[in-house]
Amino acid sequence: MWTFDAPPLEYWRSTYNFSPDQQWLDHVRLSAVRIPGCSASFVSANGLVMTNHHCGRSCTASASPADTNYLDVGFAARNMSDEKHCEGMWADQLQSIQDVTDRVRRVQTATTSSAQVEQRNAEIGRIENECVQQTQLLCQVVTFYQGGMYSLYRYKHYTDIRLVMAPEGSIAFYGGDPDNFTYPRYDLDLTLLRVYENGQPLRPRDYLRWSAAGAAENELVFVVGNPGSTGRMLTMAQMEYLRDVDYPARLAQYDRLLRSYRARSASSPQAAREYENIIFSLENSKKAVTGYRVGLLDSSIMAKKQAFERDFRARVNADPKLRAQYGNAWTEIERAQRAIAAQARALQWQSFGGGSTLWNMAGGLVRIPLQIPLADSLRLPTYRGPALERIRQSELANTPLDTAFERMALAATFAAWKEALPPDDVLLRAALGYGNGDPEAAAARIIAQTSLADVAARRALLEGGTAAIARSTDPLIVLARQVEPVNRRLATRAAALEATISANAEKLGRAIYAAYGRSLPPDATFTLRISDGLVKGYAYNGTVAPYKTTFAGLYDRAASFDNKPPFELPKRWVDRKNRLDMTTPFDFVSTNDIIGGNSGSPVINRSAEVVGLIFDGNIESLPNRFIFTDEIARSVSVHSRSITEALRKMYDAEWIADELEGRVAAR
Amino acid sequence: MWTFDAPPLEYWRSTYNFSPDQQWLDHVRLSAVRIPGCSASFVSANGLVMTNHHCGRSCTASASPADTNYLDVGFAARNMSDEKHCEGMWADQLQSIQDVTDRVRRVQTATTSSAQVEQRNAEIGRIENECVQQTQLLCQVVTFYQGGMYSLYRYKHYTDIRLVMAPEGSIAFYGGDPDNFTYPRYDLDLTLLRVYENGQPLRPRDYLRWSAAGAAENELVFVVGNPGSTGRMLTMAQMEYLRDVDYPARLAQYDRLLRSYRARSASSPQAAREYENIIFSLENSKKAVTGYRVGLLDSSIMAKKQAFERDFRARVNADPKLRAQYGNAWTEIERAQRAIAAQARALQWQSFGGGSTLWNMAGGLVRIPLQIPLADSLRLPTYRGPALERIRQSELANTPLDTAFERMALAATFAAWKEALPPDDVLLRAALGYGNGDPEAAAARIIAQTSLADVAARRALLEGGTAAIARSTDPLIVLARQVEPVNRRLATRAAALEATISANAEKLGRAIYAAYGRSLPPDATFTLRISDGLVKGYAYNGTVAPYKTTFAGLYDRAASFDNKPPFELPKRWVDRKNRLDMTTPFDFVSTNDIIGGNSGSPVINRSAEVVGLIFDGNIESLPNRFIFTDEIARSVSVHSRSITEALRKMYDAEWIADELEGRVAAR
């Protein structure tokens, strides 16, 4: 995940015999754009932009007419004037990068670290403002190496974006949740947009040409996009905390929530529709966290991290100056992490989490009057700045509530308390007291008795302040009053410990930069990176996974599951099946280093031609969050040839395929 | 894996609501046949027999004309008179089963266990002889529960078997070694034979009808065949020995051999052909043993075995009589197993193994004159009975030798010695002395100097007896003289320990039968069993594997690998592709309990109709050797519909498909 101002030219030359010039790098950088949460690229002379189906969701949804949903049924403009305006979409094109580390560092003259943070933030604000004034561009100072380096990124910001083409959701996300994060794969995860400027299609100077052949086996390819975040600079202590404390707790919580949502989902078709997205999102998180944890449980991966940490510490300790500045950071982090771990279970249960909205609201109602009088810096982190007012507003909003779900979520929380807390725990006894010791009965009685579902009741409590809270006999408020002081004490302590970790992580970021220079690329920051790799199969399932799949495999998987969801085909793909060349490559895998945020990135060859479109990683790639390996970890892309084949044969969109392939002159 | 004289009728009724009558069971038993190393079944009124391609190899090879090999190019008889005689094939149809435990047990009156074994074997011989005289059938006394029970199995033995149809090897074994033991799968692993009697097609009273629909998802199906061997009665001590000592040593040896064979194979196309089979066989063993070991390393599987052993010991200990007879068997096995483990490494290196034929021959030459004078029972186990003469004959045979391979195998053995033995080991120093401490140089010099490749030299040594051996300066004989006494001591001790384990295992077999009766089916014995299961997909690769594959998947896999071997399609399957209905089910998985020997077993539905043909298990099923689980372990079958579809569309064999489907009257 190399930044464009420090490409590993010597490494590419010696590994691949590939030596791009500055023009190649500039061309590739300017052909890429960043869109909300995703990556994308210019792929035609007339401003066509390629990204994933799931990256264009909001645009596609907003472009749909009232009686239809393009996300489900797909859309292909008949011509340019048929392209649909859409909302909430923008595209940022990276114009230039400037190292501003010295300038940021220079102002940090204060003696306390919190004052230093303020000085740093103020200077970053100044740099960004100056930049906007001077260039009219979007300007952002990016923090690399956890504070080891600061760079000013300047973007051209486009806002008139229109929908050109999106396939049916069921082919874009074929295989649904089961196939998510896996390979072999059969997804056309594509949206085509067009950038307009002054009401006319943009004619970008730089755009990626389309490769005639597409990705070939063992070919060198590059992914250009915006990886969101990685944890590759985490210390062993931090990773062990995730492995042993944080991830297990999260996974248990996902399971509790999934049980409740699934029970609700099974109750009626309407409930099924209502909870479909949240269930999918939880499944997705569960699969991802499970995969991350697999990496942390893998002794060979942990041994590699350990070896790196040893080498890093040795380098720091070998230099007296580095040692004095950074030498104790690992120990500080470890100590804080251990203290967080020691109270993690208590904090998890003595809280307003667990999934019940009413319980969460009760927490807010009890807390707001206590937090308001405090100076901002003395408030709980989640109540600082504008957050407090947002929480207050949400208490006054007319949020629709599913009583049955509330009951289940609260029962699940109580059941978890019962399992985790000693029988004589005051909170536990108070809660279960409502149900003669039975979590379900207690939750049912509390939800039946509480008036918090009524916005007027919440408003009355809010306006009544601490006195109203103290007087309330609402069972949720009564319980929340018990939890609040315990939670506040634990959360305050956790916040202080997190701040210690953060300050020492910043030290390590500087140390890593001092010890290794830019030979180690910084953790992902949702800014533009370029990653090299090879198109290549891998060992899986006792056999080998091919480097690509074909359309035939899509029809095999559909028929193998007797066309049951999520393996059913869109009608168009059934009706027009015989038009397709079944041997057309559909998806493919490569060893490029990607992570969330890279979705929609173009995959290009040495000639900077599009050979594919990144949309996922295989299940084996999830541990790459912590350390990159390419033995069996793979990124998964839509093959460029399946895009043009589908446009021509399935979507009657010859004109778009022609435009991608450069067969028509730019207008 | 239930025997036909103790089907679990109550279990089937309560689990599946299925209650077959005795007629159903008899019909199914008589429709099944056992062929060399495999299973098969009658599938038409005219004696058509269905089995796997790999089970019919010798038949198909022997039926091929001089200029062609049906194993590669396939064969389909144009009509009945076109069917090809073949050699080495027979088919045994199980007529009846009789419990003879009492009779065998009654004669075992001696006080020593070796005398008891002789009494037992003599009685078994008498029972078999009497049976043959009375019935003219093939009679075999089968030992169940390691001696807990003895049954007389009577078979009708057919020997005139002809080849009707076999597809190309590359479609029968599509995906080759990589896809072996895996699923999803795309194999037409089929041979069709016909049994003749008195020169006419047999008209069997019992044969399996063909299902019109074939296997459906979640359908109850039965596998009827002859599982070869399982290790489900092994004690924890025995399994730990396999896991920690035996399997790791075997896997290391496979790797050493594979390196040598692969190096030779790469040297010329002729060598590649020559070593193809042995490399495949080693790969196959390596994959299987790796899979078995995965099971033994799986803590949940081991926990289940442990729980069973605890329960079993508790039952034995709870009964004073059982306790007196069998109570100490576990401890005896554990003690002997530990003693074997303690000397296993020494025995492995101080031996004539390692893959070099010349080194193995040297061992024979040195040993034969020492073993000949001994009474049979005092000889090493591998030299007892007719084995000694076989070894002597092989020394005198004109075995072709690949000098380059001999050098590599010996160098690999020396390198392993160097890694395993202390630097001052006498044998190691003697061997490496030929090459200044370098294994490769030592092997090269020894192979260059030895005259053992010459059969005359070997004959001279054999005829010269101990004196000639003592005088020899041949470097392999010199080394073998050093190894022999050490090896003899270790091997003798190992044989005594193995006998202890075997005697105590027999005790446990009787104990298990006494404690659990026939509710636990006995370990596999390559005799007829029936196994129930469901047609069902499973969790794999982060997603789900479908219960079936389709022809479309075959074409996907071929195109995905750009038609490279072992994923290339036979020409016929390329040329005639468009004739096929691509959605035809090709292979499928079910939860039936099978193991090697079950190859070629029919899969039948409740109506005893053929819905598939067993040919493999998935990689997750390998640990089933030690304990049966059906969460993700699956058996893999050819779907009956792909057989008729292929016969009609690919092989111009409508008449065979019609016969299978019962569309023609029996002649």
Image (spheres, coloured by chain):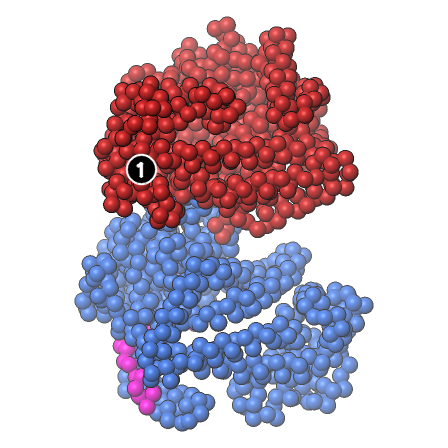
Chain colours: A red, B blue
- Which residue is found at the position 65% from the left and 62% from the top? B260
Please state the horizontal and vertical placement of residue B35, each as a whole percent of the image. Answer: 38, 70
B377 relative to A125, above or below: below
- Counting other residues with Cα less than 10 Å from the Cα at mark 1, is it few (<14), some (14-19), or many (20 or more)? many
- Which residue is found at the position 76% from the left and 73% from the top? B424
Q: Nearest the camera: A614 or B88?
A: A614
Describe the element under mark 1 as helix, strand or loop: helix
Q: Nearest the camera: B208 or A23?
A: A23
Outermost residue to the top? A198
Q: Nearest the camera: A350 or B51?
A: A350
Q: Which range of residues does the magenta coloring cover? A: B88-106
Q: What residue type is labelled 1?
A: Leu
Q: Which chain carries label 1?
A: A
Please state the horizontal and vertical placement of residue A446, each as a whole percent of the image. Answer: 26, 35
Q: State which quadrant residue B508 falls in.
A: bottom left
Q: State which quadrant residue B514 falls in.
A: bottom left
Q: Is residue B118 left or right of residue B433?
A: left
Q: Mark 1 points at which residue?
A: A410
- Which residue is found at the position 24% from the left and 59% from the top? B15
Which quarter shows the N terminus of chain B? Answer: bottom left
Q: Is residue B346 left or right of residue B476?
A: left
Would residue A173 be seen by someone viewing this image from the given angle? yes
Please state the horizontal and vertical placement of residue B92, each as a whole percent of the image. Answer: 34, 73
Which quarter shows the C terminus of chain B? Answer: bottom left
Would residue A271 be seen by someone viewing this image from the given angle? no
B279 relative to A46, above or below: below
Q: Nearest the camera: B71 or B30?
A: B30
Does A448 lie within the magenta span?
Answer: no
- Which residue is found at the position 49% from the left and 10% from the top? A196
Q: In this view, does A444 lie to the left or right of A500?
A: left
